Structures are given as C-alpha cells and as structure tokens.
Amino acid sequence: MAALIFAGDAQAYTCDCKTSGNWSNTSTWQNCGGGIPGAADDVTIKSGRTVTVDITTAQCDNLQLSAGGFGNSGTLVFNAGSQLTMSGTLSFFQNLFSWASLDMSNGGTLNCAKWTGGLFGSFSCGTGKVKFTGTSFALPWNLFMLQFYDLEVATSGNLNLVLGIEILNDLTISSGTLNAASFDIDIGGNWNNTGGSYSASNNTVTFNGTGTRYIRSAGSAYEDLTINKSSGNLNLLDDVTINDNLGFSSGHLILDTYDVTMNTISGAGTSRHIVTNGTGNVQKPALTGAFTFPVSNSTGTYNPLTLNNSGTSGRFDVRACTNVFDDGTCGGTQLVTKLANVTWQLATTSPAPSVSIIAQWDAAQESSDFDRSQSFISIYNGGSWNQQGSPSSSSGSGPYTQSYGAVSALGPVAVGGGIGGPLPIELLSMEAVQAGKDVLVNWTTASEINNHYFTLESATGSATTIKPEFHLIGTIPGSGNSTWPIPYSFLDTTPSPGQDVDWVYYRLWQTDLTEQPPSAIP
C-alpha cells in the first residue's frame, strides 16, 4: 500500500485584478487562491484597472501591466511608504503601443529584477525609489520612462542604458554595473557607488539640482562630468577620475581630502571652480603645453594657476591653501609681510620639467605692505623660499597676475610684493655700545628664511646733518633658515664720534640665497 502525503499547497498562481482596488484587499484579485499575490505568484493588471500598493509587504514574481488589446491602460500606483518586492520582471506591454502606467507620484519603493516596456508606457517617478536586482538587462526604449527619483542598481550583471536618463535625487550602485555606453545621465542628488561599478564610452554625467551633494565613485571613471547646480556644491567622498573633460556651468567642486584627475577643464571661473579646502589635489596627467588649474581654498576666492610645460611630460598636482608659511607647507609659521596670502602646492612626476608659471590673486589677499609694482613669483625648494627673477609690475586691474618662466626646480609657489618680500628676517633687537674707541654693534633675529648674509653700514652726523652718508663697514654671514633667536655682533673700529661729530648711525641690510638686491631691515 502506498500513501501520498501533502505538506501544503505549493501552487503558484497567476493573479488577475478583477477590479480596481488596493493590493492588500482580497476582493481586488481573482485566480489567486482566495488571497493576495505571494512571492511566487505572477500578477496581471488589465486595461482600464488600477491597483494601489498600500502595504510594505506586497510581493510577487512577474507583473504584467495592461494585459489586453491595442492601447490598453492598466495602472499600478504606489502609496507613500509602500513597497512591492518582485523576484521577476515588470512588463509594461503585451503589444508595442501599450499605455500602461506606473505611478510613484506619492513615493514608495519598487524592487524588481528588470523592466520591459512598450513605446508609449508611462512612468511617473514622483518621490519613489526603484531598485533593480536581476541579471543583465537593458532599460526599455520608451518615450516616457527616462526619469527616476531614487534609483539603485543591485544587479548581478549589467544594467544597460539605451537612452539617456534623469535621476532627480540619488543614484546608488550597490552591486553589478551601470553601463551608460554613450547615453547621458543627469543627476540632482548624490552618486553613491558602494560596491558596484560604472562604465561609459562617450557620454556626460551632469550634476544639477540644489543643495550640497556628494559623489562616491569607488574607482569607476567618468568620461565627461559637468557641474550645473543652481545652488550648492558637489563634494567628493573619494578620488574621482574623469577621462576627458570636467565642465563647469554653475557651482563648485569641493575636494576635501580627495584628488580629482581629468584631461581638460572648461567653463571654470570665479563662481564655479575647484575648491581645494583640504589635502586633495587637482591632477593633470601627461601635461605638455599650457593648462590652467582653476583652484582656490574657499568658494569666496579664485586663484587659478596656469602652467606651461615645455619639458618632459608628467603628471602635475596643484592645490591652493590660504596664507604663506616659512616651511612651504600649508602650516608652520605664517609669513605676513609683502606677499599675497595664498600658496599653490605644486608637485610633478616629470623627470625634467621646464615650466612657465602664471599665478592669480585678489586685492583682498594682499598684505597691507604689498607692492604690486615690485611683485614676483617665489618657489619653495631646497629648504627655503626662492625669488624667481627680478621684481616687476603685476598684470591686470583686479584680479592680478604675476608670471615667470621657465622653471625646472619646482615646489610650492607664492607671490611676493616688494623688495625682500616675503621678508626673510624678523629682528628682535639692535643696539650699538661704545667699547673704548670702538663701537660694538649687537642684533638678534627671531627667525630667518633663506638668509645668506648681513651687510652693516655706518655714517657719522651732527646736529646740522640732514642726510647721513652711509658706507660699508662689514659683511656678516647669515644662518640660512631658523625659527629661534640668533645673536650677532660686529666690532666697528672706525673712528668714534669726535670734533664736529655728534652721532654714529648704523644701518643693517640682508641678502638672501638668490642674491637678489639686499633688503633693509628696520
């Protein structure tokens, strides 16, 4: 004798909506085992009927919208906070000219493996989220299915675009690959690649919308990337590579601690450029010829640095930081006289660069004693700031520029304004003490930068002397670079004040390692 034992009803149904209604209402369905669709059931929504997803636990396998004839118009609507999870395919048609409708105007979440669609099916994204979880497929070619609010790619293969799409809010790539090919993507929110990848061959990703938004690329490169934000900026959450062009229409790119690499840059200006507010760099690979790095340290300034490399090709890294410091970094002891308060950190992989430099700054960035008629490029290398060439007048009427070239020994760049600026010596004290018939001149420096030697001059005078005539009495070696007090002395053996002489004047000069004209030390 044999016995058959049934552990339960494992039948999968094809549930038809017999009337418009809520997903959770059993009276909405027929051929559904007397209940509502389950995870293994297929669903059809017939032409002229509307089913509303009103719960967070709605589920099915495949779902067919607009089952019926030519021009049918079945509709699936989501309530706010509702969710439908499908293991199969959402189909928008049984024929090419289906008017099937997916309406997420009120929000909700749709999880499904993939979509298929007809030419005229419609999708109202509202504030809803669509998450694709299947294997490789192409989004259907459809005149009305180009816009999402939140989109998540969680596939095990490729999600292939066949037309451009617009994402009003966030894009998440948690697994699989979003393959854009040559089709453009507009995005108003965040780009968050947490575990998948992105590929494209000849397209543009445009960040638009409002507010502060973020981009996490997870190592996937963009072809062209454009920033066109009516308000707010785009912030990096990791390093970003752009194979071709970084374009600016409106808004800034904020690097923080991350690098951005691109081939070309277009459209940058005062109100739209790259803000290097941290340790992140703008990287230009294989630079030969001229290239402008449109950088600043904040959204309120603009300090582009133009490099023209006629030497060996290499990658050039640039970032701007506020103020100038004695050690060439963006920290250390701040220099405050005869300079523009911006440093361009410049580095290259070129083994033999030959670079002309054009630096730009604003009047508000100048120290109070900055002299535009005596400005110059200064480069930090060999442990000190080194003036490049002779001082000359700045170009422009605001903003201003100064240039020099060509330079092979590269490093951080700054702009000085005035002979001896940035002033290499901070003097603590200076005195003259009579020692018999001689005079001992003592002085102490608090710090020194690039200090080669001192020149000491003296002059005699009386009550009737209008302009003393100084003459050289000695040259004293400097200490190069220091951040601590250093005392100096010189014994003047020239005749002491005598008949018709009331005073002896002393004047101290400093010459730096570049042998530029000496600077008087007050």
Image: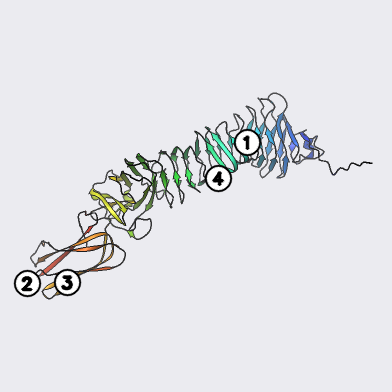
Q: Which residue matches tag 3?
A: 440
Q: Residue at x 53, y 41 (%)?
A: 188
Task: Answer above or below: position of 469 versus 42.
Answer: below
The crowd level at tag 1 (other Cα within 10 Å; few <14, some 14-19, many 20+) is some
Q: Amino acid at mark 2?
A: Gly
Q: Secondary structure at mark 4?
A: strand
Q: Residue at x 54, y 43 (%)?
A: 189
How far is the residue under mark 4 from the one under mark 3? 71 Å
- Mark 3 or 1 closer to N-term? 1
Q: Amino acid at mark 4?
A: Asn
Task: Answer above or below: position of 180 versus 411.
Answer: above
**Left or right of 208: which side holds 469?**
left
Determine which quarter of the picture holds residue 307: top left
- State which mark lies toward you, 2 or 1: 1
**Left or right of 358: which side holds 85?**
right
- Mark 2 or 1 closer to N-term? 1
Which labelled disc corresponds to residue 136?
1
Which labelled disc corresponds to residue 192?
4
Q: Quadrant of the N terminus?
A: top right
Q: Secondary structure at mark 3?
A: strand
